[in-house]
Amino acid sequence: MTAPNDALRLASERLGARRGRHYWRALEELADDAQFRDQLSAALPQLATMAPLDRRGFLKLLGASLALAGLGGCSGPPPEKIVPWVRRPAAQSDAVRFYASALCCGGEVIGVLVETHDGRPTKIEGNPQHPASLGATGRLPQAQVLELWDPDRSSHPLHDDEPSTLGAFADALAQWRTQWGTLGDGLRILSGALHSPTLRAQRRELLARFPAAQWHVHEPAGDAQTLAGAQLAFGRRCRARYDIAAADVLLTLDADLLDAMPGHRAHARAFAARRRPDRDGEGAGMNRLDAIEPTPTVTGSVADHRWPLSSAQIAAVAGQLADALGVAGAPSLPADTGAPLPVAALHAVVDDLMRHRGRSLVVVGETQPPAVHALVHAINQALGNVGHTVDYIDPHGDADARAMPDLPALVEAMQAGQVSHLLVLESNPAYTAPADVPFAAALERVPHTMHLGLYRDETARACQWHLPAAHALEAWSDARAFDGTASVVQPVLTPLYDGWSAHELVARVIGEGPQDGHDIVRAFWAGESGGRALASDEAWERALREGVIEGTRAAALNVRARVSSLSPNEWRATDSDALELLLRPDPTIWDGRYANNGWLQELPKPPTQLTWSNAALISPQLAAHHGYANGDVARLRSGERELEVPVWITPGQATHSITLHLGHGRQHAGRVGDGIGVDAYRLRTAQRPWRVGALTMAPTGARQELAATQAHFAMEGRDLVRSATLDEFASDPAFAQAATPPTLYPPQPQGQYAWGMTIDLNSCIGCKGCTIACQAENNIPVVGEAEVRRGREMHWIRVDRYYAGSPDAPSTHHQPVPCMHCEHAPCEVVCPVGATVHDEEGLNVQVYNRCVGTRFCSNNCPYKVRRFNFLQYSDLNEPTLEAQRNPDVTVRDRGVMEKCTYCIQRIETAHIAADRESRAIADGEVVTACQAACPTQAITFGNLLDGDSEVSRAKASPLNYDLLEEYNTRPRTSYLAQVRNPHPDLRRDGEETS
């Protein structure tokens, strides 16, 4: 059998023999060699031996998608007045209403519109008036509806694992208050980061009421290092606020600016708006993005240049930049400081930044140490960027910018016997605590403990009392976004279960007695603490209608960076051959709080395409050196701690960096999330939360088959992704286009509309928001890990990921692929029962009750976009499923083929509205689910017969091309080719220029 290093050698040899650009989806495609295929067959899900379906495992997963919806008739609207969104779309039935609100997802606040059918929340859309949304959502917000209807949610209070009542806890709380006395001796509160201005005010009130009490904050994927860096640079905690639209040149240092940092949807929208050379005079306004990072990110995947360097080398790069830019007060580099960034790259980056003073931006990620953050603040200041592409705001929008005591301080007090009462608010430290912070053991020494949360998770089971928390769609609150803008969180239904919100619990702890969340939040915004912003009924209702509170955007602070106190040793390059383990929030389940969400578990993670597990991401060079193949289990050891985890070879990973995502290995997540993956928190430490040094890695000899989709539904290496540099586009704007072959088929009958779509590959960042939005809109089931390994996932729109160039440092390209809705559809002519037909408006329609499951249509589809229900993936017997499902979309049965419909239910709703008003459907009136969710507006949909429609203008672009046009299928969905803007002195990363 061929060894891994030989396989990579074969791949390199084949690449070396090619000229021009060659795109590849996975390492397996690089060498068409029988021995090479044998070596890597274990990593290809479709080559794995088909094992019988584990019925118990499958039934366990039935609740993962639509089966998680329940209690359909057990709730109604809240008793307080809630106000629908003010801009109700014309194409909307009377049973559908949208309510503006806000959600905290993945560590940030996003404004949303909650779609309800007859009072039932069924879908989340973005609020176009909210600065963190701008009408888009992305991955995590879409899944909040599924979390709401999750039957594994905690349904009633528990005391010592026995059912209890809220009244019984209120009695216990009254006794506790007498034990605290007037000072609150022994009282500790533990929560996550507080994004609610009202809850922050309640915290201040509680600490004033009980001066001896303490409120601790533990956020596993928070911004502690970012704020500490600001403290170093400015002498106070503050947060950078970026204006991406004003930046001509961007440089990210281990920062996922477009997909993981607060405000990333707004950043992605502004970035994409500057990536459309066909609309701005051959790219005169096109920006440039450079990324230096140890592990592939969404931001790095769309960069014009990307350099993979270890996390430990990022500090030395920052020092190089500060030295080359002449940053005032920056410490001199030690004489033995290495030069991790190649000289040519350093000169090009510095030249770009210098030539764009005031129009450039350097961004560093949370995972870097505080000193690196401080130096980057000084770099932006030296470049004149402050006040143009970046300013600074208070992190919480109020005067309370102090750092709260953290989890290690709480555990120390617990171990010392100083804590008599601990109240844990919507946090799970028994699972998320670092390995060197023994929270679970210390908790046993606390006499009185209480946990408030959505689930009976690891912490809930360790506490004496557990109270169900009201979901964000069930409770009144407020939330502040990345730029300081505040929103009122209004519920859309009464709580499904017997629980409280954090506001209601804290009010009782303070001693204010039973208070409703609505009254608490409104009192804050009507009073002095809230600036009397919503003192009148009119202002309150306007805030509910619009989803934002006027005048709450944070004002910029007048701060100046000083970095002379930083030690030069901060920039000393580390041993480049030493292994490091990087811990990162999971792209889909974040820090583990979404582990029981089947939609997120089955969503292919960008950029690895893994589902249902985590893995140690390693570089191709490291894999070749140690002889690892995908799925081989390795033992990671740091000091006395070790963890066994399967490896996944990841092109573009820094050579000696190993990445492992947090959030997996849960023991008490629920029926979906239990026992999936490995618990990376077991290797985490409090002082170095994002990087583990002194690491060793050794094979165990075991293997684990991983469920990855990167090789599913392949289109056999055809010319799919088309890309060029800005110079190439300027010389040949129509480089992507090819002549459409003649046809012998007669034209299809033409109706009043001809629906079509374009997908702009220059805007797409591969975030997968379109995939999960389609799933939520169209009742698409989850199939489970075993079925994904068989290539049977049901997503109607997939996002293919391609590489170009060397596996060590390739460029990455994304391509969303829905049904093409071909004018000459190969699927239609082979269906023996007429289940797939063409309608007069150009839609390729699937008639479910005709389908008999021959799968001829799927076999004849060159785009591989049809999905077959091999098993009964949707539970059709549970009556409570009606609550979460979209009633406008049929739920499919076993043996039925399904696919993208261009959201035909939305088209028909628009038809009804237009016919009722005797008018034509307006451009933009029909917005597909994938289009609405996309943060970069990469998807355009509309009527091709309207020459002035957005989709018609997009198809007139010289970048427009059809996928597999040589097949002459005449698809209604087309693509705009990608154009990148590399520095003229540097070769485009991973590719040869033509």
Image: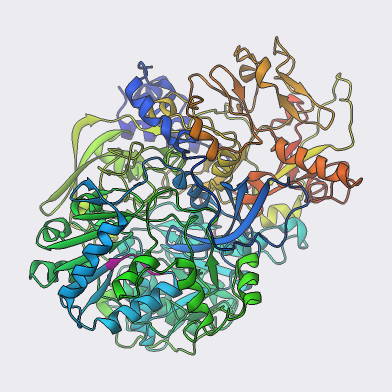
Q: Nearer the viewer, residue 403 or 623?
A: 403
* Residue 890: image location, x then y, percent: 63, 29
> In the image shown, does 187 or 321 lie closer to the viewer?
187
Which residue is found at the position 56% from the left and 78% from the top?
Answer: 552
The residue sitting at the top extreme is: 832
Dominant secondary structure, magenta: loop
Relative vertical location of residue 943 with respect to residue 747 in this rendering, above or below: below
Position of residue 600 measured from the top left corner of the image (x, y, whole percent): 45, 43
- 899 relative position to 802: left or right: right
The reply to whether the magenta stretch includes residue 191 is: yes
Q: Is residue 976 left or right of residue 685?
A: right
Q: Residue furthest right?
A: 918
Q: Compared with residue 260, is residue 660 higher up or lower down, i.e. above or below? A: above
Residue 131 colored in magenta in the image: no
Q: How is the image coloured?
A: rainbow
Closer to us: 276 or 440: 440
Q: Quadrant of the N terminus?
A: top left
Q: Is 39 left or right of 81, judged from the image as shown?
A: left
The magenta segment is 190-194
Q: Position of residue 78 (x, y in %)?
A: 53, 57
Q: Is residue 978 visible?
A: no
Q: Does 512 appear above or below 945?
A: below
Q: Is residue 167 visible?
A: yes
Percent x, y of residue 543: 61, 71
How many numbered marks are there? Answer: 0
- Identify whether 513 is placed above or below 797: below
- The image quadrant of residue 423 is bottom left
| Residue at horizontal 36 percent and vertical 29 percent from the top | 60
